[in-house]
Image: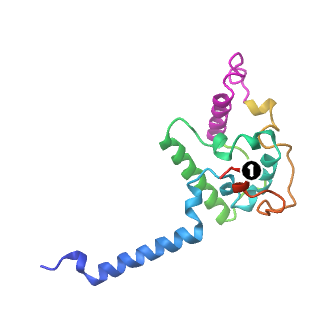
């Protein structure tokens, strides 16, 4: 009886699958999506204004996008939300359904509120903004992303913004 692993069609199929995976990983820059680099969030041009606002805001020197926008309770929820958010964004961007104004979703708002309190727990120990019916950014609107506005410059221009590796963010 002939071994199935010695079957030429199966070997050819496995080689083709491997080649397709290598090309996919190379073309999409997939490994970067597994990192916490803020540059990952700017792969879609619709995030340029958010990145530029964050870059000029007080949190830029201390945080990255994932510090606020992903849960930190365990590694599984972290990567699940990272994958689900990324898949959602890719679907909307690639099908042309990206809204003009990107707004926070309720489930993301809960994650961000939890992370604000996690990082600033000593500051808010005597306060409970959540009990007051407000999220932190209701009063501190410009802290994370700076003043709102449109960008006229592309974020990827390293003449305007230092490369992340030089700033120690990678």
Can you name the residue that lies furthest to the left here? 1
| Res. 57 image quadrant | top right
Residue plotted at (55% across, 54% down): 34
Q: Which residue is mark 1?
A: 102
| Res. 107 image quadrant | top right
| Magenta span includes 133 | yes
Residue plotted at (63% across, 29% down): 118
Where is residue 48 shown, x and y percent of the image?
77, 57
**Relative to 156, 92 lies left or right:** left
Can you name the residue that lies furthest to the top here? 126
Secondary structure of the residue carrying tag 1 is loop
Position of residue 140 relative to residue 23, above or below, is above
Where is residue 94 shown, x and y percent of the image?
65, 65
Where is residue 67 shown, x and y percent of the image?
64, 41
What residue range appears in magenta?
A: 106-135
Residue plotted at (79% across, 59% down): 155
Residue plotted at (68% across, 61% down): 43
Q: Residues within 10 Å of mark 1 (few under 14, many from 20)?
A: few
Where is residue 7 shown, x and y percent of the image?
25, 81
Quadrant position of the N terminus in the picture: bottom left
| Magenta span includes 119 | yes
């Amino acid at each position: 009886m002939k071994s199935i692993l010695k079957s030429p069609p199966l070997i050819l199929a496995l080689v083709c699958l491997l080649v397709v995976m290598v090309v996919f990983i190379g073309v999409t820059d997939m490994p970067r999506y597994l990192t916490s680099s803020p540059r990952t969030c700017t792969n879609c041009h619709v995030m340029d204004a958010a990145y530029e606002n964050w870059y000029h805001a007080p949190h830029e020197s201390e945080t990255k996008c994932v510090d606020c926008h992903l849960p930190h309770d365990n590694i599984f929820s972290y990567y699940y939300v990272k994958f689900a958010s990324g898949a959602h964004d890719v679907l909307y961007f690639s099908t042309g359904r990206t809204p003009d104004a990107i707004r926070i979703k309720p489930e993301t708002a809960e994650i961000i509120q939890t992370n604000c309190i996690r990082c600033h727990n000593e500051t808010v120990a005597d306060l409970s903004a959540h009990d007051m019916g407000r999220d932190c950014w209701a009063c501190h609107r410009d802290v994370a992303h700076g003043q709102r506005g449109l960008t006229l410059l592309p974020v990827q221009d390293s003449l305007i913004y230092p490369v992340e590796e030089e700033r120690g963010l990678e």
